[in-house]
Image: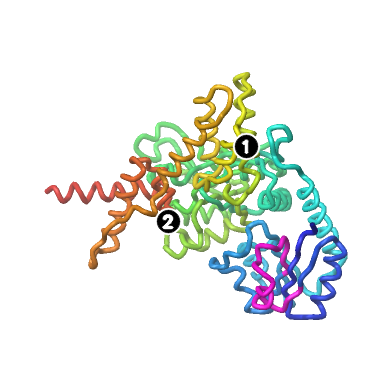
Amino acid sequence: MKPQCLILDTDAEHAQQLAEVVESCGFKTLVAGGLEQASESGPLEQFDLIFLDLDCPDNHAVFAPSEASLSESTELFVMVSVDEPGVADDAIRRGASYYFCKPLEPANIRPLLKDMAAEFASEQCKPATSSDCGIDQFGMLRGSSRGMRKLYRQLRKVAQSEASVMVMGESGTGKELVAQTLHMLSARHDGPFVAFNCAAVPENLAESELFGHEKGAFSGAARRHQGHFERASGGTLLLDEFSEMNIDLQAKLLRVLESRKLRRLGADTDIDVDVRIISACNRSPEDAVREGSLREDVYYRLAQFPLKVPPLRRRGADIEGLAQHFLRELNEKHATSLAFSEAALDALRRHSWPGNVRELKHLVERAYILSEEVIDHELRSAIDNQSASLEHDDVLIAVPVGTSIAEMEHRLITSTLEHTGDDKQAAADILGISLKTLYNRLKEYAKESQSDDF
């Protein structure tokens, strides 16, 4: 089956010429003047590649968050008649893979299209993932699904540049592995890879941890301390959960990003910074900007090249392939030969995986410990229990009219924690907030409770 391409172009003559080039490279092509006409042929998710004419304002709806029919694995190539400043950067940030000026030169796009068609063909011929044939590996990442192959292409593209990369994806999808892979592929691979979790460090220590301090800079500073920026010199610094960074510290971070110089706390001179920045978050940075918790200028500085990691539930056969990989590692480590039953594999395929790859790995490890020769009901039981603990659609909270938003939030957080048995990470995942945000709310509630006692 040929990969499918949709050309959304207001210029019918240009669209037809482009279609001939695309078809000559092995694609089945559909031409439409706009989204409304294209929708008559079915959902956008059926297309492996879309050429999008940005000259048509209606076509910008593809970027809308409500446009659920656009698959995460679909390659999006945008086209414009006039190259205006900032348009290309904005299109890339919003999910486009390439940006072209019309008219497109066939010689410039044929090699790219042929590579894509060849990769799609190899994917079609690839047998189902099993414990015998394994699963594709790219750097620290594993997966053979369309979404992962798209991610691999983007990583190859950006690895040799010095652009700041923003990795977005749900909790447990492997964002740090993406960052490590990017570091491995870059010219900085011989330098250090240093990770800093912005949500895990107390606000009063974050500046010192990032930028370092001199002896005597503050009470308790008994010696000079190198911050994460200095430790990552010549290499890569990952700012994990960057949207949770204190807003004042973000301003200082911006100065470092722009000047490539930093000053330790208590120091009088600046230090040159030679670090590539990769940032990661599991929430929408645009939402964080709108809420005021993330500076817009910091966001644009970090998001020179955004990458999206697909959730496990959208990775098809990768679910079974990764499970087999994790089991193979356990068998090799402990000199055993356990295998999954067909019923267990079927349970893996049916589960929705809200915790993504992290959840899958933990469930396989748990079932391995409990099993003898065949992993069967141990895994199915673990998945059923996991689903039950996260199944909260039928749990209702009664909120009287007149209740404040703050009180509603308090009740929701408290009830969710009761539902998860005080598992704060699970509660944060259900609520769609970071673990740091959850802890901050709980501290506020504790203070309110103490003040009410007096």
Task: Give how far across and how far down residue 413 sits, in percent.
Answer: 32, 51
Q: Position of residue 379 (x, y in %)?
A: 52, 34
- The residue positioned farthest toward the left in the image shown: 454
Identify the residue under disc 1. 192
Compared across the picture, whether 183 is left or right of 283 comes to right
Contact between marks 2 and 1 (CB within 8 A): the answer is no
Left or right? Give the position of 379 relative to 134: left
Does the stretch in magenta take in 289? no
Residue at image position (39%, 35%) is: 221
Name the residue: 36% across, 43% down: 420
- As drawn, 334 above or below 230: above
* Residue under numbered circle 2: 247
Pick whichever, 195 or 231, lies toward us.
Answer: 195
Q: Residue furthest front?
A: 343
Q: Residues within 10 Å of mark 2 (few under 14, many from 20)?
A: some
Measure the alpha-carbon separation of dots 2 and 1.
27 Å
Q: Position of residue 234 (x, y in %)?
A: 65, 41
Q: Depth check: 149 or 139 in front?
A: 149
Left or right, 381 with respect to 30, comes to: left
Would you identify the image quadrant in which residue 271 lies?
top right
Report the magenta residues as a range: 31-51
Q: Residue at x 34, y 52 (%)?
A: 395
Q: Is residue 103 above or below residue 326?
A: below
Q: How many marks?
A: 2
